[in-house]
Amino acid sequence: MKLSRRKELLRFFQWLAKFPARDLPESFLGLLLLYALHSDSDLDAEEIFHTLSINPELEKSTMSVAEKLKAKGLSQGLSEGRAIGLWIGKIQAYEEFLGKNPSPRETLDHLSIPQLETLHQNLREEYESRFKGPE
């Protein structure tokens, strides 16, 4: 199934390469590339680029779209990394306040943001019940 879908997607991009770049807005090309890459994880972006590069105008547009997608992915990755780092710092701080050994970063790195939020909330509640008491 995957091989046939992959061939169909590549065949589609071969067909698309026959169109002038001015007929394909970058946003449309970007959506097509995202769809293709998300629908088939085995599909290689370089194969698509190579297929589209038979049309020099389209090759330029494809590179521009690819660079934007790459930058967006990098930006999202950095944002998520910062968020994870922030949660890990808060968790380790609460663990220290509670007299516990802080969890190793390597252990916490494997948790999702919702899991980190839950762990943080549990530690915060433990801290508040121990040190703040009932109000």
Image (cartoon, rainbow, N blue to C red):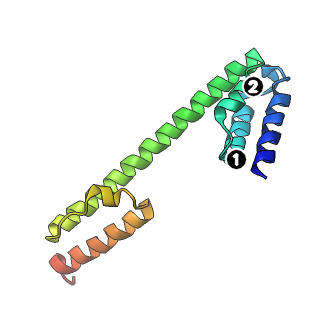
Reply above or below: 117 against 132: above
* Residue beneath disc 2: 52
Q: Position of residue 44 (x, y in %)?
A: 66, 37
Q: Residues within 10 Å of mark 1 (few under 14, many from 20)?
A: some
Residue 20, given in percent of the width and then of the height, sits at 82, 20
**Which quadrant of the rendered structure holds the C terminus?**
bottom left
Instruction: Say whether residue 111 is left or right of residue 95.
Output: right
Q: Which residue is mark 1?
A: 40
- Left or right of 128 in this view: 82: right
Quadrant in the rendering for residue 98: bottom left
Disc 1 versus disc 2: distance between alpha carbons? 18 Å
Residue 72 picture quarter: top right
Q: Are marks 1 and 2 in contact (CB under 8 Å)?
A: no
Vertical relation: 51 (above or below) 88: above
Q: Is residue 21 left or right of residue 67?
A: right
Q: Identify residue type, mark 1.
A: Asp
Q: Position of residue 47 (x, y in %)?
A: 69, 31
Name the side, left or right, on which 133 lies relative to 122: left
Q: Secondary structure at mark 2?
A: helix
Percent coordinates x, y for residue 34 in the rendering: 67, 41
Type of residue at label 2? Answer: Leu
How many marks are shown on the rendered structure?
2
